[in-house]
Amino acid sequence: MDFDSFVNDIRENGWNVFGTEVYKDGRLIHSWGDVQDGIHEIYSATKAVLSVAFGIAYDRGLIGPDDPILQYISATAAPGWEKVTIRRLLTMSLPGLPFRPEGDNWIRFSLGCDIDPDECEFNYSNICTYLVGVALTKVFGTDLGKLIEDEIFMTLGISDFEYAYSPEGYFYGASGMKLCVHDLSKFGLLLMNGGSYEGKRIVSDEYVRMATCVQQMNREGGYGFYIWKYRDGYSINGKWKQKCYILPNDGVIVTYLSHIEDDSHDLLESMEKNILGIL
Protein backbone atom coordinates (compact mmCIF):
# COMPACT_ATOMS: atom_id res chain seq x y z
CA MET A 1 0.00 0.00 0.00
CA ASP A 2 1.52 3.29 -1.16
CA PHE A 3 -0.72 6.04 0.23
CA ASP A 4 1.84 8.77 -0.47
CA SER A 5 1.78 7.97 -4.19
CA PHE A 6 -2.02 8.19 -4.21
CA VAL A 7 -1.82 11.64 -2.60
CA ASN A 8 0.90 12.68 -5.04
CA ASP A 9 -1.34 11.67 -7.96
CA ILE A 10 -4.14 13.81 -6.52
CA ARG A 11 -1.84 16.81 -6.19
CA GLU A 12 0.02 16.45 -9.48
CA ASN A 13 -3.15 15.96 -11.52
CA GLY A 14 -5.04 18.73 -9.77
CA TRP A 15 -7.93 16.42 -8.96
CA ASN A 16 -10.51 18.23 -6.86
CA VAL A 17 -10.38 15.83 -3.91
CA PHE A 18 -11.23 17.31 -0.52
CA GLY A 19 -9.82 14.50 1.58
CA THR A 20 -9.32 10.76 1.82
CA GLU A 21 -8.99 8.07 4.50
CA VAL A 22 -7.89 4.44 4.55
CA TYR A 23 -8.85 1.91 7.22
CA LYS A 24 -7.36 -1.51 7.82
CA ASP A 25 -9.11 -3.97 10.13
CA GLY A 26 -11.20 -1.17 11.62
CA ARG A 27 -8.25 1.13 12.34
CA LEU A 28 -7.55 4.41 10.55
CA ILE A 29 -4.10 4.02 9.02
CA HIS A 30 -3.92 6.87 6.49
CA SER A 31 -5.53 10.28 6.18
CA TRP A 32 -4.99 13.28 3.93
CA GLY A 33 -6.74 16.59 3.33
CA ASP A 34 -9.94 17.92 4.85
CA VAL A 35 -11.41 14.82 6.42
CA GLN A 36 -13.17 16.23 9.50
CA ASP A 37 -13.34 20.04 9.47
CA GLY A 38 -15.60 20.59 6.45
CA ILE A 39 -18.78 18.93 5.25
CA HIS A 40 -19.25 18.38 1.53
CA GLU A 41 -22.00 17.23 -0.82
CA ILE A 42 -22.20 13.45 -0.96
CA TYR A 43 -24.99 13.36 -3.58
CA SER A 44 -26.24 9.78 -4.08
CA ALA A 45 -24.14 8.43 -1.23
CA THR A 46 -27.13 9.75 0.73
CA LYS A 47 -28.97 6.66 -0.47
CA ALA A 48 -26.83 4.42 1.75
CA VAL A 49 -27.99 6.42 4.78
CA LEU A 50 -31.60 5.81 3.75
CA SER A 51 -30.80 2.12 3.31
CA VAL A 52 -29.68 1.93 6.93
CA ALA A 53 -32.89 3.68 8.01
CA PHE A 54 -34.89 1.12 6.03
CA GLY A 55 -32.94 -1.62 7.81
CA ILE A 56 -34.00 -0.23 11.18
CA ALA A 57 -37.66 -0.33 10.13
CA TYR A 58 -37.19 -3.82 8.69
CA ASP A 59 -35.62 -5.09 11.91
CA ARG A 60 -38.60 -3.77 13.88
CA GLY A 61 -41.08 -5.54 11.62
CA LEU A 62 -42.55 -2.24 10.44
CA ILE A 63 -41.92 -2.79 6.72
CA GLY A 64 -40.65 -5.46 4.35
CA PRO A 65 -38.96 -5.37 0.96
CA ASP A 66 -41.73 -7.42 -0.65
CA ASP A 67 -44.54 -5.18 0.61
CA PRO A 68 -46.35 -3.13 -2.07
CA ILE A 69 -45.30 0.52 -1.95
CA LEU A 70 -48.97 1.58 -2.14
CA GLN A 71 -49.51 -0.16 1.20
CA TYR A 72 -47.72 2.82 2.74
CA ILE A 73 -48.58 5.70 0.41
CA SER A 74 -52.23 6.56 -0.07
CA ALA A 75 -52.35 8.46 -3.36
CA THR A 76 -53.76 8.15 -6.84
CA ALA A 77 -51.38 6.10 -8.95
CA ALA A 78 -51.06 5.23 -12.63
CA PRO A 79 -51.88 1.64 -13.68
CA GLY A 80 -49.26 -0.89 -12.67
CA TRP A 81 -48.13 0.74 -9.45
CA GLU A 82 -50.29 -1.66 -7.43
CA LYS A 83 -47.77 -4.38 -8.43
CA VAL A 84 -44.65 -2.46 -7.40
CA THR A 85 -42.92 -3.77 -4.29
CA ILE A 86 -40.48 -1.85 -2.16
CA ARG A 87 -37.76 -4.27 -3.29
CA ARG A 88 -38.15 -2.95 -6.84
CA LEU A 89 -37.48 0.55 -5.48
CA LEU A 90 -34.59 -0.49 -3.24
CA THR A 91 -32.87 -2.18 -6.19
CA MET A 92 -33.64 0.45 -8.86
CA SER A 93 -35.30 -2.22 -10.98
CA LEU A 94 -38.34 -0.32 -12.26
CA PRO A 95 -37.93 0.70 -15.91
CA GLY A 96 -39.72 3.78 -17.17
CA LEU A 97 -39.06 6.16 -14.31
CA PRO A 98 -37.34 9.47 -15.08
CA PHE A 99 -34.18 10.31 -13.15
CA ARG A 100 -35.75 12.63 -10.58
CA PRO A 101 -39.15 13.86 -9.37
CA GLU A 102 -40.34 17.26 -10.56
CA GLY A 103 -42.87 19.96 -9.66
CA ASP A 104 -44.24 20.90 -6.26
CA ASN A 105 -45.87 17.54 -5.47
CA TRP A 106 -43.35 14.77 -5.90
CA ILE A 107 -45.71 12.01 -4.78
CA ARG A 108 -48.22 12.92 -7.49
CA PHE A 109 -45.46 13.21 -10.09
CA SER A 110 -43.80 9.93 -9.12
CA LEU A 111 -46.91 7.78 -8.91
CA GLY A 112 -48.21 9.34 -12.10
CA CYS A 113 -45.27 7.99 -14.12
CA ASP A 114 -46.06 5.31 -16.68
CA ILE A 115 -44.31 2.07 -15.78
CA ASP A 116 -44.30 -1.56 -16.81
CA PRO A 117 -44.24 -3.46 -13.50
CA ASP A 118 -43.73 -6.77 -15.29
CA GLU A 119 -40.34 -5.71 -16.64
CA CYS A 120 -37.48 -5.93 -14.14
CA GLU A 121 -34.25 -4.29 -15.20
CA PHE A 122 -31.86 -1.77 -13.67
CA ASN A 123 -33.03 1.83 -14.08
CA TYR A 124 -31.34 4.35 -11.81
CA SER A 125 -33.89 6.88 -10.55
CA ASN A 126 -34.03 9.13 -7.51
CA ILE A 127 -37.80 8.60 -7.50
CA CYS A 128 -37.22 5.10 -6.14
CA THR A 129 -35.38 6.36 -3.07
CA TYR A 130 -37.75 9.26 -2.55
CA LEU A 131 -40.78 6.93 -2.39
CA VAL A 132 -39.04 4.59 0.07
CA GLY A 133 -38.31 7.63 2.24
CA VAL A 134 -41.99 8.61 2.19
CA ALA A 135 -42.95 5.06 3.20
CA LEU A 136 -40.45 5.14 6.08
CA THR A 137 -41.86 8.45 7.30
CA LYS A 138 -45.29 6.79 7.43
CA VAL A 139 -44.17 3.65 9.28
CA PHE A 140 -42.00 5.47 11.82
CA GLY A 141 -44.71 8.09 12.35
CA THR A 142 -42.14 10.85 12.67
CA ASP A 143 -39.87 13.05 10.58
CA LEU A 144 -37.38 10.69 8.96
CA GLY A 145 -34.54 13.21 9.08
CA LYS A 146 -34.94 13.56 12.84
CA LEU A 147 -35.05 9.78 13.27
CA ILE A 148 -31.82 9.46 11.27
CA GLU A 149 -30.23 12.10 13.48
CA ASP A 150 -31.33 10.38 16.69
CA GLU A 151 -30.82 6.72 15.81
CA ILE A 152 -28.01 6.74 13.26
CA PHE A 153 -25.98 9.94 13.40
CA MET A 154 -25.93 10.16 17.20
CA THR A 155 -24.76 6.55 17.54
CA LEU A 156 -22.07 7.12 14.90
CA GLY A 157 -20.92 10.33 16.60
CA ILE A 158 -21.91 12.49 13.62
CA SER A 159 -22.74 16.04 14.69
CA ASP A 160 -22.06 18.18 11.61
CA PHE A 161 -24.35 17.48 8.64
CA GLU A 162 -26.99 18.82 6.31
CA TYR A 163 -29.82 17.12 4.44
CA ALA A 164 -32.72 18.08 2.19
CA TYR A 165 -36.50 17.77 2.01
CA SER A 166 -39.00 17.43 -0.83
CA PRO A 167 -41.47 20.26 -1.56
CA GLU A 168 -44.08 18.41 0.55
CA GLY A 169 -41.72 18.16 3.50
CA TYR A 170 -40.47 14.57 3.24
CA PHE A 171 -36.84 13.68 3.92
CA TYR A 172 -35.13 13.40 0.53
CA GLY A 173 -32.98 10.33 0.87
CA ALA A 174 -31.78 10.25 -2.74
CA SER A 175 -29.36 13.19 -2.48
CA GLY A 176 -28.91 16.54 -0.76
CA MET A 177 -26.83 15.43 2.22
CA LYS A 178 -23.50 16.85 3.34
CA LEU A 179 -21.01 14.98 5.51
CA CYS A 180 -17.27 15.06 6.09
CA VAL A 181 -14.98 12.31 4.83
CA HIS A 182 -14.48 10.85 8.29
CA ASP A 183 -18.22 10.52 8.89
CA LEU A 184 -18.87 8.84 5.55
CA SER A 185 -16.17 6.33 6.53
CA LYS A 186 -18.27 5.48 9.57
CA PHE A 187 -20.95 4.06 7.30
CA GLY A 188 -18.31 1.83 5.72
CA LEU A 189 -17.27 0.66 9.18
CA LEU A 190 -20.91 0.11 10.16
CA LEU A 191 -21.52 -2.10 7.13
CA MET A 192 -18.24 -3.99 7.45
CA ASN A 193 -19.04 -4.69 11.11
CA GLY A 194 -22.42 -6.19 10.25
CA GLY A 195 -24.51 -3.29 11.49
CA SER A 196 -22.60 -2.36 14.65
CA TYR A 197 -20.36 0.61 15.34
CA GLU A 198 -17.98 0.63 18.30
CA GLY A 199 -20.03 -2.09 19.98
CA LYS A 200 -23.38 -0.35 19.44
CA ARG A 201 -25.82 -2.07 17.12
CA ILE A 202 -27.77 0.14 14.71
CA VAL A 203 -29.07 -2.43 12.24
CA SER A 204 -29.02 -6.21 12.04
CA ASP A 205 -26.36 -8.31 10.36
CA GLU A 206 -29.19 -9.97 8.41
CA TYR A 207 -30.16 -6.67 6.87
CA VAL A 208 -26.57 -5.66 6.10
CA ARG A 209 -26.07 -8.95 4.23
CA MET A 210 -29.22 -8.31 2.17
CA ALA A 211 -28.32 -4.69 1.46
CA THR A 212 -24.75 -5.37 0.38
CA CYS A 213 -25.25 -8.49 -1.74
CA VAL A 214 -26.23 -8.36 -5.42
CA GLN A 215 -30.00 -8.04 -5.62
CA GLN A 216 -30.13 -6.66 -9.16
CA MET A 217 -27.57 -7.05 -11.94
CA ASN A 218 -26.36 -4.04 -13.89
CA ARG A 219 -23.43 -3.18 -16.13
CA GLU A 220 -21.36 -2.13 -13.09
CA GLY A 221 -21.52 -5.65 -11.69
CA GLY A 222 -24.54 -5.54 -9.41
CA TYR A 223 -26.59 -3.53 -6.95
CA GLY A 224 -27.98 -4.20 -3.49
CA PHE A 225 -30.24 -1.94 -1.47
CA TYR A 226 -28.75 1.42 -2.61
CA ILE A 227 -25.25 -0.05 -2.31
CA TRP A 228 -23.10 -1.00 -5.31
CA LYS A 229 -21.13 -4.18 -5.91
CA TYR A 230 -17.38 -3.44 -6.07
CA ARG A 231 -14.92 -6.25 -6.80
CA ASP A 232 -15.28 -8.77 -3.94
CA GLY A 233 -16.88 -6.12 -1.71
CA TYR A 234 -19.19 -3.18 -2.22
CA SER A 235 -19.24 0.60 -2.32
CA ILE A 236 -21.21 3.71 -1.45
CA ASN A 237 -21.24 6.03 -4.46
CA GLY A 238 -22.00 9.69 -5.06
CA LYS A 239 -22.47 11.60 -8.30
CA TRP A 240 -19.12 13.35 -8.69
CA LYS A 241 -16.74 10.78 -7.20
CA GLN A 242 -17.88 10.69 -3.60
CA LYS A 243 -16.86 7.17 -2.61
CA CYS A 244 -16.56 4.71 0.23
CA TYR A 245 -15.15 1.36 -0.90
CA ILE A 246 -15.58 -1.55 1.51
CA LEU A 247 -13.58 -4.76 1.02
CA PRO A 248 -14.47 -7.07 3.93
CA ASN A 249 -12.21 -9.94 2.85
CA ASP A 250 -9.19 -7.62 3.05
CA GLY A 251 -10.45 -5.58 6.02
CA VAL A 252 -9.94 -2.42 3.94
CA ILE A 253 -12.09 0.71 3.64
CA VAL A 254 -11.14 3.61 1.37
CA THR A 255 -13.15 6.84 1.48
CA TYR A 256 -12.78 10.06 -0.44
CA LEU A 257 -14.96 13.06 -1.17
CA SER A 258 -14.36 14.92 -4.40
CA HIS A 259 -16.07 17.12 -6.91
CA ILE A 260 -14.95 15.95 -10.33
CA GLU A 261 -17.59 16.40 -13.01
CA ASP A 262 -16.45 13.94 -15.64
CA ASP A 263 -16.67 10.25 -16.44
CA SER A 264 -12.96 9.55 -16.09
CA HIS A 265 -11.66 6.68 -13.99
CA ASP A 266 -8.25 8.22 -13.28
CA LEU A 267 -8.85 8.77 -9.57
CA LEU A 268 -10.23 5.26 -9.12
CA GLU A 269 -7.37 3.71 -11.07
CA SER A 270 -4.81 5.57 -8.95
CA MET A 271 -6.55 4.41 -5.77
CA GLU A 272 -6.66 0.81 -6.97
CA LYS A 273 -3.03 0.83 -8.01
CA ASN A 274 -1.59 2.59 -4.96
CA ILE A 275 -3.95 1.52 -2.16
CA LEU A 276 -5.28 -1.86 -3.28
CA GLY A 277 -2.26 -2.94 -5.31
CA ILE A 278 -4.29 -3.63 -8.44
CA LEU A 279 -2.32 -2.99 -11.62
Image: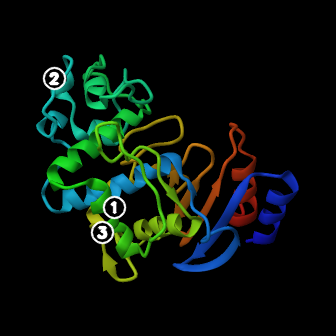
| Sooner in the amino-acid sequence: mark 2 or mark 1 | 2
* The one of 61 and 260 positioned closer to us in this rendering: 260
Which amino acid type is marked by label 2? Thr
Q: Which mark is residue 23?
A: none
The quarter holding residue 148 reads bottom left
User: In x, y percent, where is residue 42?
Assistant: 53, 52
- Counting other residues with Cα less than 10 Å from the Cα at mark 2, is it few (<14), some (14-19), or many (20 or more)? few
| Up-down relation of residue 236 to residue 221 (above or below) | below
- Residue ID for mark 3: 150
Q: Secondary structure at mark 3?
A: helix
| Sooner in the amino-acid sequence: mark 2 or mark 3 | 2
Q: Nearer the viewer, mark 2 or mark 1?
A: 2
Mark 2 and mark 1: Cα distance apart in space? 33 Å
Which amino acid type is marked by label 3? Asp
The quarter holding residue 62 reads bottom left
Q: Which mark is residue 76?
A: 2
